[in-house]
Amino acid sequence: MIKCQTMAILLSAAVTLGAATADKYASSQDWPVAGGRGGVRYSTLAQIDKENVGQLQRAWQFDSSDEFEGSEMECNPIVLDGVVYATTPRLRVVALDGATGKLLWDFDAHRGKKVIEKQRNRGLVYWGNGDERRLFVGIDSFLYALSAKTGKPVDSFGDHGRIDLHDGLGKNAQDLTIQATSPGVVYKDLLIQGALVAEDLPAAPGYIRAFDVRTGKLRWVFHTIPLPGEFGYDTWPKDAWKYIGGANSWAGLTLDAERGIVFAPTGSAAFDFYGANRIGDDLFANCLLALDAETGKRIWHFQFVHHDVWDRDLPAAPTLVQIEHDGKKVDALAQITKYGRVWLMDEETGKPLSPYKEVDAPPSDVDGERLSTKQILPTEPEPYARQQVTEATLTQRTPAAHAAVLEQFKKLRSGPQFTPPSKQGTIIFPGFDGGGEYGGGAWDPETGIFYVNSSEMAWILRLVPRVMANRATTGSTLYRQNCSGCHRPDRKGTPPEFPSLVDIGSKLTRDQVTHMVQEGGGRMPGFARLGNAPVNAIVEYLMTGNDIKLGGAQRARKHDFTPLKYGIDGYNKWLDPDGYPAVAPPWGTLNAINLNTRQYVWKQPFGEFPKLVAEGIRNTGSENYGGSVVTAGGLLFIGATDHDRKFRAFDKATGKLLWETTLPASATATPAVYEVKGREYVVIAAGGGKSGEKSGGSYVAFALPAKSSSE
């Protein structure tokens, strides 16, 4: 067990508590780790409780004015010595007075340059030693080290305060997209970091790496796509490491500092939906990895999906918990999934602590694909999201809506988990965004209850032949071959995740569009490899509609790979003609699960659509992103819902709503709980931008009235 830590120790090193009961937790006024220590998202503060939470009022609001169309804020702030450290939609780093919201300093890596590409950041990493305190943050393809006192880059770290995230990925990845959207963890003098890479080829490999916190020097690398001679190499085609990317830990990491173990959840290999060039189980994609934090050596792994073609990334870092198992208390991990199930694993061995079943997986009828014949699913707890769309689960919102989706349903393929992608279109439920998502779960060590919010949206996965370049290649052909899988053949995209490119010339300059096509960003690969003439042809087609014909076959210049035969026709949420989900409510839920008994304590719809509320239709639930925080005051705080802009406090024991307020924009982020001068605060980012809702750029903090702060 972890011993109590003094505040001095907490502030001199980034530490994580292992699984522990409530009385073993250090009482902390701060929130020093994004997601809470051990990913537990629990606060010992109890000044705000079930009796007085109704008196909460806005204590301060910081408006960054950095929002732009489609921007988001997913940052869970960290708080140290009463200072809130966070990021804005344009990825400025800000330090705010925790009591007033006053800006103390800011750091702008773009130096005032207009930011047009959406980037995500889910939090910063803190390291300290004596008087030296640093913050680490991923911006573009770099990892910065900033002084926590001034916000200035630490000159001795890497190249004048930053390192290139391509370091350690190999020469073939040097011009490919990579970002650090989720914070890493610090163990002793190591910063351990995952990354976001492109989801179509060419994509960088998702290696997990450790850097020296003082110098930025690369200290170790774990190859999630094994090299020859490494464990797991035989689960891929020969030399797959040379051309396959992904298998990356984009969702963040969890550290048990006591044991010296870092836990890394990984995503699917690129390309996400068709794997004819990666036949096999594809270790270490879709795995939970336990690595020696000192050396990066594998301790154990567990693969949740073999040869993933459903985009079933592990969407959040696991939570360190303690559960009753066979009459004993066991230190364990709770791992949520996009498909709506919780896995419980022994922390030291990786052995599942709940029964699971092996299921037969149907074969693919798409040429070239060869799926794994067996997959696995836990049998308890029961899923926190429905598992299959049937005719009985289609929307009944209006007769017209039902009739429209029923007609579509009859043309689509629907089945249980692991129903193969198809040319006709396969219903993925829960969809590509879950089920569970990056907010993760919150665990209450007082009661053993685990809280997870979930979306219940159906998406349609349809494989389509890729348009192959030839001697008659044109800008439109190149667009359809390289861009239409995300932005659709009609260029309308699936906003806000993949924006419409229709009439893009009225929004961006030619130089800006050219830069985006060449460099990529986030999940989008860059296409500089095509060469200048093909890139210019794509840009001309997007800007004007003119279709330039190129002479001679166009080949990839910098990467030797063959485009796959099939792509997809877009990331398509299945909606009715009025834009509401095609399935019947609930469209989102909030769930409380007793991990000792594996039974639900309560479960309820979560989120609403204001337009439907105006029509008298309530408690539908909605898509939700971001997580919750549970407190010793008996409360569960959560924003997350896409459409209603609400921030809520629930009775953690019963699920009863005790307080809510409306924010400037939806809060698809996790709150932080902290105390300054005897007054407890709860702060959350209001960034909006999801599901077509307006973007925002504010941090809003709440507290009891000042006169009650000492009660």
Image (tube, rainbow, N blue to C red):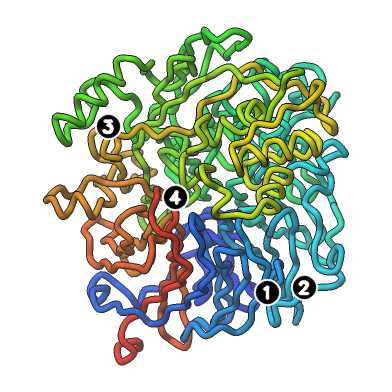
Q: Amino acid at mark 3?
A: Val
Q: Nearer the viewer, mark 1 or mark 4?
A: 1
Among the two numbered marks 4 and 3 on one chain, the one whose residue lies closer to the N terminus: 4
Among the two numbered marks 1 and 2 on one chain, the one whose residue lies closer to the N terminus: 1
Residue assigned mark 3: 583
Inter-mark Cα distance, 3 to 1: 45 Å
Q: Kindly indicate whether the residue at mark 2 contacts the one at mark 1 (C-beta within 8 angstroms).
A: yes
Quadrant location of the C terminus in the rendered image? bottom left
**Badge 2, how many Cα within 10 Å: few under 14, some, many 20+?**
many
SS label for mark 2 = loop
SS label for mark 1 = strand
Q: Amino acid at mark 2?
A: Pro
SS label for mark 3 = loop
Q: Nearer the viewer, mark 1 or mark 2?
A: 1
Inter-mark Cα distance, 4 to 3: 25 Å
Among the two numbered marks 2 and 3 on one chain, the one whose residue lies closer to the N terminus: 2
Inter-mark Cα distance, 2 to 3: 49 Å
Q: Which mark is residue 107?
A: 1
Q: Nearer the viewer, mark 2 or mark 4?
A: 2
Inter-mark Cα distance, 1 to 4: 31 Å
| Residue 146 position in % (x across, y down) | 73, 72
Between 30 and 349, the residue placed more toward the observer is 30
SS label for mark 4 = loop
Q: Which mark is residue 85?
A: none
| Residue 119 position in % (x across, y down) | 60, 55
